[in-house]
Amino acid sequence: MPTQYKNEQNKKNKMSELYKLPAGWEWKKLETVLDVQNGYAFDSKLFNESKGMPLIRIRDLKNGYNTEVKFSGYYDEKFVVKKGDFLIGMDGDFICYVWKGMQALLNQRVCRLINFSEALEPKYVFYGINKYLTEIHRITSYVTVKHISSKQIKNIEFPLPPLAEQKRIVAKLDSLFEKIDKAIELHQQNITNTNTLMASTLDKTFKKLEGEYSKQKIESFSKVGTGVTPLKSRKDYYNGSINWITSKATGYDFVTEAEMLITDFAIKECRLKIYPKGTLVVALYGQGKTRGQVTELLIESATNQAVATIVVDKNQNNKYLKFFLKKSYLDLREKASGGTQANLNLTIMKNIEVPLPPLPIQQQTVEYLDSIATKVDKIKQLNEQKLESLKALKASILDKAFRGEL
């Protein structure tokens, strides 16, 4: 266990001794009332999208129903996850989820809470554990991705009332959260509807243009490139003054700040190019929905090799191409090659055909789509604000519940 975590955990233990629980409650380490099962390192050569047993990886937890890949080899029944099991992702964000889908396999870096004590209501732990996982996440140091171990989970000190009180709290939370979750679902649906509206508008707009103007390959009116990741072990490559981004940046509409700063020395030795403002950046690969996402540089920046950079000629409109690539998101993902780790590449990007009207028509198209996007964004922001308020309300209710104040 990292020294920083030990020190922080010791502080937490002292705090738990000072924290006054209601009569009949006590602090217990989770390892005294349950166990944590680690997932298995299934052979990735047997991963596929069509046959075998669904395989739960970290990226599948939020969805909770479906998996991106299946496993076609032999497996031990003890790694079969059933509907209602509580699962925790052990890399990135540490969050406990309920699995709601069909039976599936527990992959490495996903763990399951099992063997609950008779003195424990499992759902009581589910409702309370994320607060402690969030705290572990906060104090965990990392280089690229944060990691948690099953030992750290088992060492969590948890406020435990008598079983009857646990069941009362769970019933109360179920009742309160049913109403809140319905409101959350409504706002999430509103956001989905606005996304659908924007996608439909993009599709109709470019279908009309395709019927009126000839198509041109991106490479005929743009320069397509990429970048490199300077060796992490070279300290003289980092903490400089030059912006450097990865495919993570494509999760935003614009890039206004860098993920890291690199040095002039890194630029020269790694033969990196600094791309100008207005450059479009497309994710060539990445987990989940990342592949195919597009963003635009509002700063000058170098990139890693996981993205394609597109510098549009000055006699064309870069925002026009950006909207086209947004429209083509699903098409781009289908063009990716490479099996379970499908990737886009520069050749694919260069050969994408775009309906290319005269510049004034491109500008008119951008103005129209910008106006729709602005309205859509306002609706989304309003619903996202309400979502945050509802989530804060849930957190407040949970805090009271586990202090014995509900």
Image: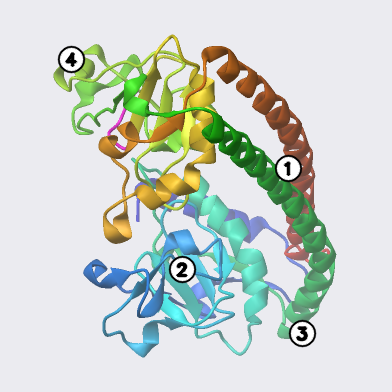
Q: Which residue is denoted by mark 3 in the rendering?
A: 164
Q: Residues within 10 Å of mark 4 (few under 14, many from 20)?
A: few
Quarter in which the C terminus is drawn: bottom right
As drawn, is 332 to the left or to the right of 256? left
Quarter in which the N terminus is drawn: bottom left
- Judge whether residue 155 can be spotted in this image: no
Helix, strand, or loop for circle 2?
loop
Magenta stretch bounds: 302-306
- In the figure, 248 relative to 311: above or below? below
Q: Which residue is denoted by mark 1 in the rendering?
A: 384
Q: Position of residue 191 (x, y in %)?
A: 72, 47
Q: Where on the picture, by quarter, is residue 312?
A: top left
Asked which colour scheme the image uses, the reply is: rainbow
Residue 18 vs residue 196, the one in the foreground: 196
Q: Earlier in the sequence, mark 1 or mark 4?
A: 4
- In the figure, 144 relative to 265: above or below? below
